[in-house]
Amino acid sequence: MAFSWILRTFAFHTIWRNMAEPLAERLRPRTLDDYIGQQHLVGEGAVLRRMIDSGHISSFILWGPPGVGKTTLAQIIAHRLETPFYTLSAVTSGVKDVRDVIEKAQKGRFFNEASPILFIDEIHRFSKSQQDSLLGAVERGIVTLIGATTENPSFEVIRPLLSRCQLYVLKSLEKDDLLKLLERAVTKDVVLKERHIELKETNALLRYSGGDARKLLNILELVVENSGKSGASENAGISITDEAVVHCLQQNPLAYDKDGEMHYDIISAFIKSIRGSDPDAALYWMARMIEGGEDPQFIARRMVISASEDIGLANLNALLLANAAFDTVMKIGWPEARIALGECAVYLATSPKSNSAYLGIDAALALVRETGNQPVPLPLRNAPTKLMKDLGYHDGYMYPHDYPGHFTPQQYMPDALTDQRLWHGQHNPAEEKLWQRMVNYWGKRYEE
């Protein structure tokens, strides 16, 4: 009788402890066999799998979006190698914390034992001095560093530390990975398996999660809890539908960090869609930025740049419209400014393209850096004083407006660069006219 009471009490406390722990933590894999996704790194024969199986790992940095298994992978490695595992968060730790951990690792290590693992989450948030404090310990093998970051390490991690670590890129989880995780949650989790959950529809769950496993499990847990509060009996079971998920969350599913990697990726996709003459893609990426709360002036500025860089002389109205769109944003703001931005994006994407002016100015800058300060030909110099006139300044200059067609050939480039060509017309209707005019003026110089 007493023993039975002890068993029931133990079971109650176990379930209570599990219920207090978030679902994402309860389902955190303990072995590589349970790990979902990232098969390019941990699948049979993959680079990290081979390293782990050998029992010897070198320092590395895991770069990927949130919720794809960076922390879990580090913990699995530490458990598999049975080596001391220290964790620091770059958000809350300073240089002193780093040095304390390194000292503990050095004192606690036995001869010939594998180096303790130091896992640093969000390593991109470490300052330069904090990252510098890691260098010696990593280089001497006092610790094996595993860093996790959601930001591009080439921008956020100092070069000396980056050179001492391998870099492995983790990807957002695929649909099949997420579905496998959902199935595991409702059938294996000690709490959810008692709720008799049916995954009737999963589109909303997948859409709102955005490839983030942690977010997916948090949403599932929230929907299940919300269903429990609706008054239905727990034994009646729970049916997960898209409508139930949307009703429970009542929020926009988009992920957009205006200061992070996605910010630069999406604006890059937007500009490349304009350059590639795809108005549908341009509007889509613009909508992503708008819905994510991007500064409309930032979008407008980038379109002004695109009009100059990618359209240029092929359509001179493009720069005018881009500037008008920027002016409209400044004058009227949201939400009406979205119309002007959309109009401009479509116009730029559907315009003929030319980067001849962009290439021309870059070629000119490169030539100036290479050849230095070449003297201005005397006929082109200003001669405001008698001395300058006596020295030959302005002498021989031919005023183009005095000649038929407002043109007469004369030398405008420095003496040492008379044969240099910097602008090369491209084949579009507007630019063909400009190029043909130059051929008429300069003859063989522009005949290509």
Image (spheres, grey):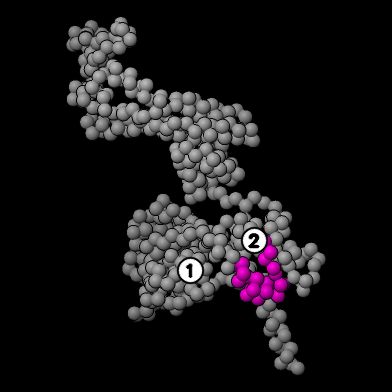
Q: Amino acid at mark 1?
A: Leu
Task: Give me the disc on residue 137.
Answer: none
Residue occupying the far bottom of the picture: 1
Using the rendered view, name the quadrant where residue 157 is placed. Answer: bottom left
Quick one: SS at disc 2?
loop
Taking 416 as reference, is 438 left or right?
right
Taking 194 as reference, is 41 left or right?
left
Residue occupying the far right of the picture: 231
Name the spot of residue 21 as percent of width and height, x first. 64, 70
Taking 195 as reference, is 446 left or right?
left
Please give the range of residues in magenta. 181-202
Residue 49 covered by magenta stretch: no
Quick one: SS at disc 1?
helix
Residue that numbered label 2 is attached to: 202
Is residue 261 depicted above or below 20 in this figure?
above
Name the spot of residue 121 as percent of width and height, x first. 49, 62
Q: Amino acid at mark 2?
A: Thr
